[in-house]
Image: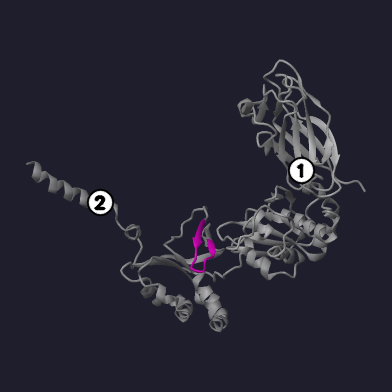
Amino acid sequence: MKNSIIPILAFVFLTFGLVQCSDPWDEHIAEGLTDVNQSLLERLNKEENATLFMDLLKSSGLDNNLDGKIAYTVFVPRNETIQSLVTNLKADATALRRFVQNHIAVSTYRLNSSSDTVQLTMLSGKIVDLVNSRVGGVGFVNPNKGSSDGIYHLIDGPLMPQLNLWEYISQNTTYSQNLFVESLSTYNLLPTASPDDPGDSLLNNEFLQNLGDVRVEKDRFTYFVLENEIFDSEVNGFLPYVNYRNQADSSLQISRYHIVRDLLVAQAYSSTDLPAEVTSISGVTIPVNKADIVETIPLSNGFVHVLRAPNLPLQNKLLDLKIEGEQWSNISASVGNSTFVREKKDPLGQIFKDVMIQNHGVSLLSVNYRLPHLLSTSYDVYWRAVNDIQANVFQQRLSILGMAVLDEQGQSQFPELRSFPYTNVELRNYNEVYLGEFELAQLQQAWAQLTGAATTANGTNTLVLDYIRLVPKVKQN
C-alpha cells in the first residue's frame, strides 16, 4: 500500500510543477491576444501599414533577430510617418541599423492606461519610456498585436534614436559650457585622492565623477546650458570666490566648474513640466523662468534647456557647509572607551546624532575634521553642542587650520587660519552658538579642529559636538 502511493504522489507533484512553471508567454496568450499561432515576422509581413518599416528591418539584417528564440516587442511606425526617412536611412547602414534597433524592445510589453512609467530597453541600448499611452512621446494607432513569439504595436511616428546627455555635451561643444565639461576628461581641476581609472578614462572627468555619470541611459537628468556670453559672464562673476594659489588659469577653470556643477538636475523635466524651482545635484536651488528657454532638446535620458539669461543668483551658489560631529577624521589621542556617538531627541522632537568624549583624562584633546575646498571669501561660523549629561558648564574651542606643510625638521605642521576663543558649553542649550567669522584669501582645503580644555580633570575637559556650520558670505564691492 505504501509503495503504491509514492508513484501517484510523484505524478501529482510533477503535474502541479508543470502548471506552476508554465511559460510566461502562454499567460499572455490566455489574456486574449489573437493570431498567436503565427510568428512575429509572419504577422508583420502581412501588416499593410508596416511595409516601409519592414523594408528597413530587412535591409538592416535585423529581421534575423526575430527568429522565435527570444520574445520581442516591435514598435512599428505607420508608413506615412517614415516615408521621408527611408532614402537617407538606406544610404547610411549605421544609422539604418540604429534606427531599426530603436524600435525593438527585448521582452514583451503591452499598452495599458497606467500612468506609471515603464523603461523599455531597446536593441539600440537606449531607454524609451512607456507612459500615459505613449511610447517615447509617440501615440499608438493599433496596439497589442500578438504572435507566437512577441507583440507589435502600430505607432503614429518614428522613435528617433536620441543622444544621451554625455553624447549631447560631446557633440555640441560650440557652447563654451559643453566644451569645458568635455575638456575635463583630459584636464584635472584639482589634485584628487582618486587615481585615474585606466579601464574607464571618462570617469576621470570630474563632472562625471563628482556629479553624475550622464552616459547612463536608465538615469534621468535635466541640464541647463547657458549661451556663451551668459556663461562667460557668470564665470567671471564667480572668479573672486575661487582664487586658487593666485593662478589665473586654474582659478578660471575652477570657476567654470562651479558654474556648471549647479546646472545639472537628477530628474528629467520637459519644458512644460519644469516647476518654478528645481534643486541641482550639487544642492543649489535653481529658479526657473521658462521665458528664458530658447531651445529644449529631448534626450534618451532627459532634457537639455538652453538659457539666454543667468538663472542663479550668487547667494544661491554660496551653500552652507555642515560638518557633523560624529563624522570626525581623527582624534589626537586614543580615547575610544570615553568616546560616545549619541542619538538623541531635542525639545522639538527632532532626532540628531552627536559625539561626546567624556572622562578621558587628556589635556587639550582635539577632534579633527577634514573639510572640502573652501571658497576664497569670509565665513560665519556656528556650532551646536549639547551639554545635557553633566551638571557643570565646560569650555571647548574651535580652530580652522590649513593643510599640512613640512617644517625645517620635516615635521607636518598645520597653519592656523583662525582660532576662536574658548567658549562655554552651557547646560541644555539646543540652539546654535555663533563663534565668529574667518576669511580665506585663496580657495583651499582646510581642517576644523575641536579642542578641549587644557586640563586632565574629568568633567572640565569634556568635548561635545552636534555639528559645525560654515556660512560663506557675499563679498562686498
Res. 7 in view:
yes
- Residue 385 pos. (x, y %): 72, 27
**Which quadrant holds residue 32?**
bottom left
Q: CA distance from mark 2 to mark 1?
A: 73 Å
Helix, strand or loop at label 2? It is helix
**Which quadrant holds residue 83?**
bottom right
| Left or right: 3 in relation to 165 | left
- Residue 103 pos. (x, y %): 49, 69
- Residue 71 pos. (x, y %): 39, 65
Q: Is residue 351 above or below residue 313?
A: above
Amino acid marked by disc 2: Gly
Give neighbour class at mark 2: few <14, some 14-19, many 20+ (Cα, 10 Å): few
Look at the image and tell me in which quarter the N terminus lies.
top left
Q: Is residue 429 above or below residue 411?
A: above
Kindly identify which numbered label has been placed on residue 17: 2
Amino acid marked by disc 1: Gln
Region rendered in magenta: 118-128
Residue, x 80% and y 61% (percent of image)? 231
Q: Earlier in the sequence, mark 2 or mark 1?
A: 2
Kindly identify which numbered label has been placed on residue 411: 1
Q: Is residue 413 above or below residue 115?
A: above
